[in-house]
Image (spheres, helix red, strand yellow):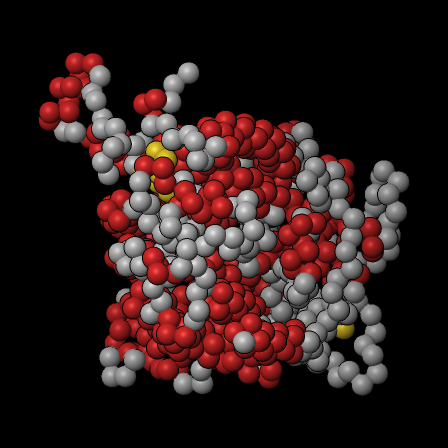
Amino acid sequence: MYRHRSFMIASVLAAVLSSTASLTAYAQDEPPNPPMQQWSFSGPFGQYDPEQLQRGFKVYREVCSTCHSLKLLSFRNLADPGGPSFTEAQAAAIAATFQVTDGPNDKGAMFQRPGKISDYFPPPFANDQAARAALGGGLPPDMSDLAKARSYDEGFPWFIVDAFTMYNEQGPDYIHAIITGFTNAPAGFSQPPGTYYNTYFPGHAIKMPPPLHDGQVQYTDGTPQTVDQYGRDVAAFLMWASEPKLDERKRLGFQVMIFLIVFSGLLYFTKKKVWHDVELHPELEKPRAPTEYQH
Amino acid sequence: MSGHPTYQPQGPFMKWMERRLPIASLVYSSFVAYPTPRNLNYWWTFGGILAFMLAVQIVTGVVLAMHYVPDANLAFNSVEGIMRDVNYGWLLRYIHATGASFFFVAVYVHIARGMYYGSYKEPREVLWILGVILFLLMVVTGFMGYVLPWGQMSFWAATVITNLFSALPAVGHGIVTWLWGGFAVGNPTLNRFYSLHYLLPFVIVGVVVLHIWALHMVGQNNPTGVEPKDERDTVAFTPYATVKDAFFVGLFCIVFAYFIFYIPNYLMHSDNYIPANPSQTPTHIVPEWYYLPFYAILRAIPSKLLGVTALAASIIVLAFMPWLDTSAVRSANYRPLYRQFLFIFFAAVIGLGYLGSQEPVGGYVIAARLLTAYYFAFFFIILPLLGLFEKTKPLPNSISEAVLRKGLPAGASGPPPAGAKT
């Protein structure tokens, strides 16, 4: 009888839970999930591809940097290990092409000078208001953390699957999808003025005009010069910009995992030996006091 | 307990010390000779895991505090500086942030184990209440820590949670202004949260000492819920419990390290990588995953004041479990009905957690209300009534007997349940 009653309760609860799970997404206008891309830095042994980061940096520098700042990065970072692997001389040369505000000098005035390797990337606009004024009200986000600051919700049960597949690249997937997602608005979509239709942008009305077209940025290594490839490269570069220690993290992680697995294995066998007498003959053996436990 | 060896100081220094400060014999009797039931399963290792996690959080936190700047204009960039420029700063921060989540994983397992095996029952009421206080302290500390990076989610979580106090009649708005140190969440709020986030872990340490003290007064519960009767029922804490705990700390660390090194941002919200912006509300404000069941209870109730009351009650009710549960039998292994209702309770909490992460619309609200109703019915109706109506299984006479009987068919030679209360 008890069994019967609790079975009833369990089935009522199961009904509640399953009705919840079958509810469809609330918002009608949710954009589709960005398609998953192949990234050199995904998975347990994934590392950045320096050549891709250099190409991505080229795209950032020639296109994105017109509007998007990269405030948290310094030119020296371009020569950091696990990054685009520019030499220090190359990084210094890149820095010198930027004009940086310095000062005040001994007359009390601010002045412009070529960038040094220790400088941070200068922002394209003096402040947010200047950016909005120049760009018709839109504020381009800073790109330093962009690849970690953007994500999308895959919903149940995928968010659980992600933990096992180590899918950590929602940000770069989203950035690539936005860059390649510009298209004509479907019939019946009322496009707010000053916005562009983008398949993957929430609400589909993005203030950024399509930033890239095929052949816009010159690659010297024979990589296809397509918007798709630009998007992939710049998304990889932005992932590095927001997570510059990823290479080191995954390398150290593997060593730590090996250590922990071996160490736990040793602890397991130690435990087995210590408990051997207690578990084998519980009725015969009185467990030894710690003082007696000596070999 | 009698019959267990006492500490004999070896060597002149230890003998000299023993007469002045017998700390060695305290450690010996508490962590070496201390008798633990021989039949503890691995669910009992989570107490040790929690002690380990507390140490991890304090050590990483102290180092992070050397580099962090609690200023509304500098906090976000100082955390980014830790991630980018401090030697192994990324590792410290990922350990600390993921560590908060794993601290809560361990505490939820620890609480669930206590509920399953009736560890809150006489004479362990004070031990249990100290545990509920520890959990409350963890909730407050974790929340304040989440505010410190001063990202969008930090700022808006602080706004939403502190605003809960405004539901209190008459004094509510005054309390909120007092908490903020101003008329909105701002620099004074961040400063005091930082101060308290540094202070509270040491309060936790203090209460942990009381928790362990209370534990050592009453002894550990065990899977049978029958108190140890003689020496055959117990083993010495060291090496038996220590090596078992160490093994599971190792396994726990494997999962912990997996999250730190391979999916460090999995348990974080991407919006928290956007600097706090008081003039822009994120589309969805969600708390950290470990608060989601309580968040769902809060939102399930249409009245703000009642919602806040339910939220507080959902945690505080735990402290009354020793008296709400009227059954004389501790372990759910011998309480077939309680066992089923408890598993439904666990499922309801997980369900509430999922609902807490979703928009409160349509069927989600109804589901959250049903599960909230079950949450409280479990404590206020099911627990008191079960003790009166439930037919429990026969208890073993002793722990040793339970261990011996393991291989025999169930109920082969079970004594009557008369010995329920030991």
The percent position of residue B64, horizontal first and vertical second, equals 40, 42
Query: What residue do we see at 15% from left, 19% from top?
Result: B15
Across the whole image, how many numbered discs are drawn on residues?
A: 0
Query: What residue do we see at 33% from left, 53% from top?
Result: B197
Query: What residue do we see at 47% from left, 76% from top?
Result: B374
- Relative to B124, A154 lies left or right: right
- Asked if A112 appears above or below B9 in the picture, the reply is below
Image quarter of the N terminus of chain B: top left
Quadrant location of residue B323?
bottom left
- Relative to A27, B201 lies left or right: left
The percent position of residue B381, horizontal first and vertical second, equals 39, 78
- Asked if B359 appears above or below A52 in the picture, the reply is below
Q: Is residue A203 visible?
A: no
Quadrant location of residue A31?
bottom right
* Farthest front residue in view: B413
The percent position of residue A217, horizontal first and vertical second, equals 81, 49
Q: Toward the viewer: A12 or A245? A: A12
Q: Is residue B165 visible?
A: yes
Q: Toward the viewer: B60 or B256? A: B256
- Relative to B336, B52 lies left or right: left
* Farthest left residue in view: B20
- Asked if A22 appears above or below B221 in the picture, the reply is below
The percent position of residue B195, horizontal first and vertical second, equals 29, 53
- Asked if A186 appears above or below A168 in the picture, the reply is below
Q: Toward the viewer: B1 or A180? A: B1
Query: What residue do we see at 45% from left, 62% from top?
Result: B393
Image quarter of the C terminus of chain B: bottom left
